[in-house]
Amino acid sequence: MNTTSPDDDVNQLPASSVPDLLLGEIRELPGHADLSFSAPPERLSGGFWAEMYILHLTDPTEKLPTEVVARIAPDPALAVWETTVQSGVAEQGFPTPAVHCSSGPGGALGRAWSVMDLAHGQPLLAGLSGLNALVRLPRLSRQLPDQLASVAARLHGLDARPVRTQLEALTGESVQIDRFVDHLTERAHALDDARLIAATGYLARTLPESTAVVICHGDLHPFNVLADRGRLTLLDWTAARIADPTYDLAFTALLLSMAPLDAPAALQPTIGRAARWVSRRFLRQYEHHTQRHIDQVHFDWYTTLQATRILTEFEGWTASQTAHLHQGHPWHAIAPSVRDLLDTTAIR
């Protein structure tokens, strides 16, 4: 799924009023009428799509924890999609915040929202920049690939059928990868981008047959994984899909290999070499955890798919003149490399 920029009218809401409006909507749910704030809400930074707050609550009914995260989304269809997947994997015991309640955009807030458990910990690459990046590389190169591979292996071991059934009931159509290729093709033609049109044409002609169909996160990278004393928690299910496991593996390996880190130019060659090694080790560790061989033909095709997905989203921001709303997003740093990758891929 692709992210969508927030609606301009919605963004005109004063930031201070958003938690109050949300609280009013939660109070309208059965059994939550007496809910109140025990302390001012805290705005969470780092999100590029949804607006998030930590809510400190007084709940006489004890139906909600005293601390929760509210995720307020600009696109109701994507909000329902991600909430469905997140709830489905949490119900199977996967380490992601449980969703307590959610709603569409019909209330006073005017946006879709969900309320979930507060996940503790720090992103796997928290504070990694500059010289600090170089100092921590040896340890990261050993630890990070296994952490990501273990998360991916555990996710791919879940039963995809309940989530797939729910998503198809919501959308009324297949939710497998061929529909995603169709979506990218439509976007490429709408953007009138020759590179993307060629890429999506190649993807449609050479779509491989999946050897397995699993729940894929779609955005599995170190900043979406929180570590807390050995426990790893996966966040942000907006890009989740029902797909071949290689959908996740290609994305994670691609992002790791391009290492969109803030570091001086003199350090970039060293970081680049280490990043490519980490990317390869991630794939080896996944094979170790799953005892499943990664098919190179599948991997190359899904790498092209993920590069096309990234560039389609980035060029969409450029065309709509909304790129400034996504400052700091890794797509800005890696878009040139992704263009080069597509230009050197055998797309014809």
Image (spheres, rainbow, N blue to C red):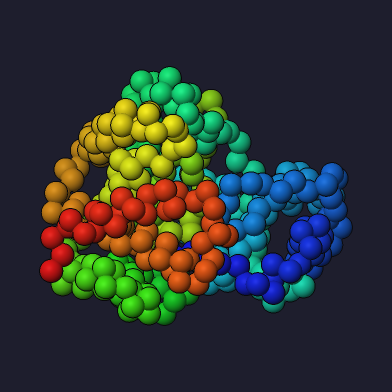
The answer to which quarter of the image holds residue 322 is bottom right
Please report the residue visible at 13 percent of the width from the left and 60 percent of the height from the top: 346
Count of numbered circles in the view: 0
Q: Is residue 285 visible?
A: no
Quadrant placement of the C terminus: bottom left
* Residue positioned 44% across, 76% down in the render: 171
Q: Residue furthest front?
A: 266
- Nearer-the-camera pick, 89 or 41: 41
Q: Is residue 294 above or below residue 48?
A: above
The residue at the point 38 percent across, 76 percent down is 191
Q: Quadrant of residue 207?
A: bottom left
The quadrant of the picture occupied by the N terminus is bottom left
Tell me if I can see residue 19 in this picture. Answer: yes
Residue 262 in the image: state x and y as whole percent.
Answer: 47, 37
In the image: residue 60, left or right of residue 215? right
Residue occupying image coordinates x 20% and y 51%? 299
Q: Nearer the viewer, residue 264 or 127?
A: 264
Q: Nearer the viewer, residue 154 or 304?
A: 304
Q: Is residue 273 left or right of residue 120?
A: left
Q: Position of residue 234 (x, y in %)?
A: 48, 44
Quarter of the rendering containing residue 215: bottom left
**How far from the left and from the top, in percent, is residue 166?**
45, 68
Q: Position of residue 314 (x, y in %)?
A: 42, 62
